[in-house]
Amino acid sequence: MVGFPSLFGGDDERDDLFDDYDEYVPEHLPELGPFVAAQQVLTGEAHVAFHEVTRAVFEERTVYDMTFNYNLAKLNLDTRHPNAGYRYAVESADGASSDEAVLRAEFTPTTPFCPQSNTLTLGSFRAWNGLSEHHEYDIVRVRLHPMHHQSASINERLAELEAEYRETGTVTDATGESDETNTALSADRAAGYDPNAPF
C-alpha cells in the first residue's frame, strides 16, 4: 500500500526536500540576526563542520523539533523552511584581549510564535556546552532571533544559563529547573500556551 507523506517528517520524508549535511547552501539558511551579524560568521566549510558537530550533540541530547519529528540540526537543511535554523559566528574580542574561544549561535524559528523556541534554544545550549568535548569552543552562547514574539524573555533565560555555566563550568539539567526560575516558560503559560502542545 502506498503511504501518505507525513506533514511532520519521519520515515516518509523525501530526500529531495533536504540539502545534504556536507553542503553549504546560503539561500537555505536564515538571514543573519543581530546576535551574529557583527561577528566572524561561519560560512562554507567552517559552517558545515560545526553543523556536523551540532547534529551529533543534538542527537546525543535528543534536541528534536517535535513538529517535524527530526533532529533540530536538520531544520537548516529543510528547503521548505529556508529562513529557519541556526547561524554561527566566532565572537570577536572587540579590541579586548580574551583567551576564551566563544561561538555564538542564533536560532531563527519557522514562525514568530513558535511555541518550541524556548525548549529548543535551552536544549541547544545544554547540548553544545554539556558536550563541549565535541568542539573547540570554551562556550557556545545561544540566542533566539528577535523576530520571535517572546525573544526578550527567552534570551534573558539563556543569558542566565550562560552566566551560570561560566561560573560553575557545568550545565544545569532541564529536570533541575522549576517553573519559577524559567521565566520564558512562565511567560508561555501566562499567555495560555500549553507546553505539551504538539505544535
Image (tube, rainbow, N blue to C red):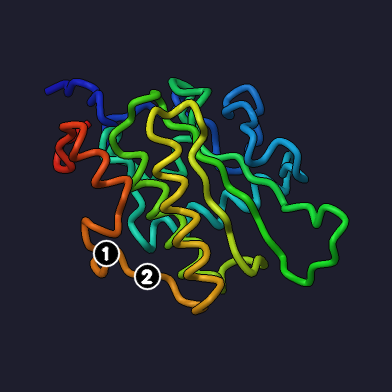
Other-residue count near label 2 (Cα within 10 Å), few / some / many at <14 / 14–19 / ≥20: some
- Furthest toward the bottom, the residue is 168
Q: Is residue 98 left or right of residue 67?
A: right
Q: Is residue 108 above or below residue 62?
A: above
Q: Is residue 9 above or below residue 184?
A: above
Residue at horizontal 78%, vertical 72%?
99
Which label belongs to residue 31? none
Q: Is residue 43 left or right of residue 113?
A: right
Q: Nearer the viewer, residue 28 or 5?
A: 28
Residue at horizontal 21%, vertical 32%?
191
Mark 2 sits on what residue? 172
- Locate the N terminus and report the quarter of the image it occupies: top left
Quarter of the image where one finds residue 196: top left
Tell me residue 88's x, y (percent). Answer: 64, 45
Other-residue count near label 1 (Cα within 10 Å), few / some / many at <14 / 14–19 / ≥20: few
Q: Is residue 88 left or right of residue 156?
A: right
Using the numbered discs, state the Cα–Cα distance from disc 1 to disc 2 in whole angstroms: 8 Å
Tell me residue 64's x, y (percent). Answer: 33, 47
